[in-house]
Amino acid sequence: MFKYILKFSKEGNVCYISHLDLMRLFYRAIKRSGIRLGYSKGFNPHPKISFAQPLSLGYIGLNELMEMETEEEYEADIIRQQLAELMPEGLKIKECVRVEEGGKTLAARTVAARYLIEIPLQEGPGIPVEEMGRTYMSQERILAMKKQKKKKELLEVDIRPMIRDISFSSNGVSGGQALIIEAVLDSGSVSNLSPELLMETVRKRFGLVYDRNEADVTREEIYFR
């Protein structure tokens, strides 16, 4: 087996396809390209492709990562070129590199991600934007209702330790003001904080009024251990 990591961006209307459909898209593109994808062993073999971290529906991803294994060795740039030609509008293959086999997967190594959140405000925040970061993080605890993976139930948790860095700024938009949040959040199998929970706690803390459908979330980078 030969292992490769693809870096790609996901923007525009393609942001609204699910993670499962994204996996199918890449699988079909790889198959159409003629690249001989590797498969797991056993009774029900599956293609050896995986992503560092699923991207939520509607989120923009600037530097997403996928790893795959092939039966034959290929030039990394040939893989990039062949798949780039088969991608729909909004999906851009930026880079492909050959890596050593074995070791932990990208998903197992993922620890954090950097997000850019833009929220067009209808009302709020009531205090200068430059004070929001200090005020928000001065809270001893930041409580949110978080879904537990195994039990599939909501549990009140303190998300403050999951926020590695955060800053607030503003940007003028047509007819009003947009709140800009830049944050590095835990992201991985050990600890994971959704930007949705962050946005909800910010909304409650500052009494913001906005339409969630008008807010944009961009994952700019994924960090590994």
Image (cartoon, rainbow, N blue to C red):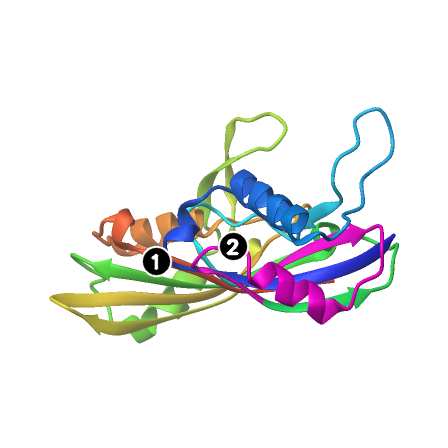
* Residue bounds of the magenta highlight: 64-93
* Type of the residue with mark 2: Arg
Q: Which of pointers 2 and 1 indicates the residue nearer the eye? A: 1
* Left or right side of 127 for 144: right
Q: Position of residue 166 (x, y in %)?
A: 46, 67
Q: Where is residue 177 in the image (x, y as percent from the top left)?
A: 19, 68
* Type of the residue with mark 1: Asp
In the image, 166 versus 88, the foreground residue is 88
Lower sequence index among marks 2 and 1:
2
- Verify whether residue 86 appears in magenta: yes
Q: Mark 1 points at which residue?
A: 216
In the image, 162 versus 53, the foreground residue is 53
Label 2 and label 1: CA atoms lie apart by 22 Å
* Left or right side of 1 for 23: left
Using a 10 Å C-alpha cutoff, classify the residue at mark 1 as few (fewer than 14 neighbours), some (14 to 19) or many (20 or more). Answer: some
- Verify whether residue 73 appears in magenta: yes
* Left or right side of 163 for 203: left
Judged from this view, the residue extending furthest toward the left is 175
Identify the image quadrant of residue 98.
bottom right
Task: Locate the C terminus by quadrant.
Answer: bottom right
Q: Which residue is drawn at 57% across and 54% down?
A: 162
Q: Mark 2 points at which residue?
A: 160
Question: Which secondary structure, mark 2?
Answer: helix
**Residue 58 appearing in the image:** no
Q: Residue at x 70, y 67 (%)?
A: 78
**Residue 25 appearing in the image:** yes
Question: Which secondary structure, mark 1?
Answer: strand
Name above or below for residue 192 compared with residue 172.
above
